[in-house]
Amino acid sequence: MRRILKYLTWTLGGGCLLFAGWLLLRIFLCDQFVVPSDSMNPTLIAGDRILVNKLIAGARIYKKLEFGKDIPLRSFRTPGIRKVGVNDVVVFNAPRGYDRNRIEFRINYVYSKRCIGTPGDSVSVRDGYFRNNRHPGPIGDTGQQRRLHETPDSLIPRKVLRAMPFDDRLFGWTIRNFGPLCVPQAGTRIALDLRNYKLYRQAIEYETGGKLTYSGGQALLDKQPLPEYTFRCDYYFFCGDNVSDSKDSRYLGFVPEEFIIGVVRRISFSEDPDTHHRRPDRWWKRVE
């Protein structure tokens, strides 16, 4: 009987240690996600299992385990190897977690996209091709961007063609010609004219928790004049490689740094989600 109890104790203890190790691995080092769509095609396709490295940007640690509508994210980030950079493929929480036209955190609503702009960058799209004032090289999949460049506007549905902030009189931006747009950086001060109000309203409301409006030629935060604003947080601009079919920052706007989960490094496993046919040629493939 004593031998059986000893065996059960060691088994239970070993199981607890394994579970704790697995949990710590997911929290601090690496996690796995399943790609549900082809918005990152051809880099990632539906059915890919991707490994997300949390050491690069630092692991996000929750201060409070309370999640839901109208509950703000409370977290801090462990020291990372480096910041997220242009061309990194990143997993992050969707910036409009509850689709209420504002930045909101939703814990299990995540996207995987490519970083087009980092804090302080000026991003744009010219004739279908991504541009970044600090990054002279190609960004994303230029083959997909060439397809967009060659596709007439008449063949693209209007709801797909139009891009944020959806003001055709003041901007008229589309997924083919967009920007330039400066990505907010902590410490950067902007004048809140009508143009900047349209571009940065969601970020300002996210940081202040207030309601930003524009009336009588001036911006009002909770009905109080706000002629200028200094950003408190860093933001990123993410887009899918499948530029003609991707719900991303061109429609949703900026992503707060604290929404970032990690950088995708490899595809661990892949199978067709419809046929369950395995794709061994994609197993352990490096993501770039």
Image: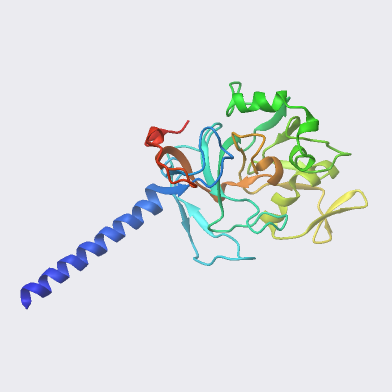
Q: Is residue 16 left or right of residue 113?
A: left
Residue at figure coordinates x 68%, y 32% from the top left? 123
Rendered image coloring scheme: rainbow
Corner quadrant of residue 98: bottom right
Q: Mark yes or no: residue 133 visible.
A: no
- Residue 211 placement: quadrant: bottom right
- Picture coordinates of residue 74, whole percent (x, y): 54, 60
Whether residue 101 is situated above or below residue 172 in the rendered picture:
below
Where is residue 48 shown, x and y percent of the image?
46, 42
Q: Is residue 213 left or right of residue 32?
A: right
Residue sitting at the far bottom: 1
Residue 169 lies, in percent from the top left, at 89, 39
Residue occupying the point 77% across, 35% down: 174
Residue occupying image coordinates x 62% and y 28%: 144
**Residue 13 image offset from top left, x and y in percent:** 20, 66
| Vertical placement of residue 43 versus 112, above or below | above
The N terminus sits in image quarter? bottom left
Total marks shown come to: 0
| Residue extending furthest toward the top | 136
Residue situated furthest front in the rendering: 275
- Whether residue 183 is situated above or below residue 14 in the rendered picture: above
Q: Residue at x 71, y 23 (%)?
A: 150
- Residue 25 visible somewhere in the drawing: yes
